[in-house]
Amino acid sequence: MNRKPWKYSLERTYAGLHQDSVSCLAFSPCGQFLASCGKGRVCIYSVSRSKVIRYYDIVDASPVALTWGDTADDLYVGYSDGHLWQYQRPTQGGLRSMLARFFSSADMWQFGVLEGSILKMTWGSRSRHLFVAHGPSVTVLRPVTKLAWDIVSELDEPELPYTALGFQPPAPCPVGMHVSGRRNQIIVADRDYGINGMSDVSHDCTTLAAWNLKDGLDIYTLSPSMRKYKETINLHDNLGENTNVLLDVVFIHDDFDLLVGSNVGQPVIVNLRSHHVIQRLEHSPVNCIVSVVAYTQLGSRRYIATADRELGTETRVKLWVAKTDSPFWNFISRILDVFRRVRKQLGTLLLILIVVLVDRVIIQEGLWSWRSQPALSFLAALVNLAEGVRDLGTHFMDASVVPETSPAVATSTSWSAKLKLSQV
């Protein structure tokens, strides 16, 4: 199948937000928002408007992992001290955020504490389970109420594929965690237990790609009970001397290509079949580690986010975009861009009209007192109406997204056993 490769150009550079390494990047399920976390801060970005919506400054511990829920209304963040926090509606800033604080509505809270530093987090959209890798363990959690979560199970540690006399096996360190479409299975890749670097699984859950900490990507075929080595994609010409670093690997473009981080400041896009490097993203002119990457699609556009580490105050997050050559999709994208820009102003105008209505009808006419419960309920209903107007562009935009094949997440609530990746 011949297809024209996507070509990415730099859309926006975000500087000064993270004062140290960025540990995680994640696009929201709708593709409209990007979240990043690093030492002392969590940032939320609007992809279509290429701007920062809001950020959270963290004092006690550093956020090291994050994942979105079913929508952009829920963001789960894990910290270096094992604490788990939920951020509600993190993409809403400005007036709505002020109203939430006025009515004492908390928009973030702690819902759990696990042993050890949080390493990885992923959300199962169909099963509604949160999978958290911490220390050598993987814990499966399920929300019961807004603030209460139950631990469904804790996955067993993997077995080494070999043993040696007097050999002390290292503690497992999950470097990849992927919800499988097969029943009761989650694929966990542990460092030094067959998979050494960061990994990703194709959307049909038949292929696993892993950074091998040496010269490129190891490709495996997956079956319900084992993995089988297939080939290695050599990236030696695109690497520096220090290859013993964890670099993100992401399947993109309907699993035709792979996005790989870099230890020389230039993440690469590699074709899975031909093994050719399609494009280098020049994130930094200097040789730095760009270990964190993410990918999404929004309408007719594809977006890639890259972030570096170990650069202190020079840390950068960059957003890249690839656009289609189709006149139809370009026309639709322009219409949606205009609508997304004006919906915020329309919602703000409606909120102003609500305030005038409250002042004229409720207060001056004396129907209810300002702080009475009926008045607050009435005001809350009107604010929800205004939010619906502001979010209308979101839902309208989602209907126009050309869906890529997405993994089917198992619906069973039993996660007592993970897929054992056997050496073949």
Image (cartoon, rainbow, N blue to C red):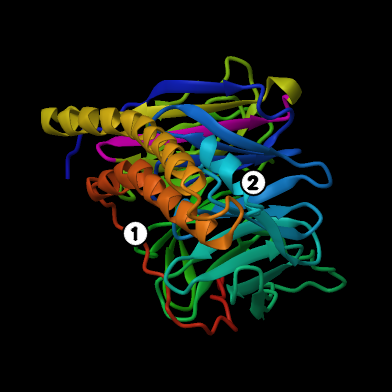
Q: Quadrant of residue 134?
A: bottom right
Residue at the far front in the pictured view = 365
Q: Residue at x 57, y 23 (%)?
A: 14
Q: Residue at x 56, y 46 (%)?
A: 90
Q: Is residue 416 visible?
A: yes
Q: Name which of mark 2 and mark 1 comes first in the sequence.
A: 2
Residue at the far top in the pictured view = 285
Q: Residue at x 39, y 37 (%)?
A: 353
Q: Quadrant of residue 54?
A: top right
On screen, residue 290 versus residue 80, left or right, reads left
Q: Residue at x 41, y 28 (%)?
A: 49
Above or below residue 59? Residue 342 is above
Above or below residue 166? Residue 32 is above
Picture coordinates of residue 241, whole percent (x, y): 67, 29
Q: Which residues are magenta?
A: 299-311
Q: CA distance from mark 2 to mark 1?
A: 37 Å
Residue 107 part of the magenta segment: no
Nearer the observer, 55 or 21: 55
Residue 101 circle label:
2
- Helix, strand or loop at label 1? It is loop
Picture coordinates of residue 422, whole percent (x, y): 56, 73
Residue occupied by mark 1: 406
Q: Quadrant of residue 311?
A: top right
Nearer the observer, 72 or 89: 89
Residue at the far right in the pictured view = 166
Q: Quadrant of the N terminus?
A: top left
Q: Main secondary structure of the magenta part?
A: strand
Amino acid at circle 2: Arg
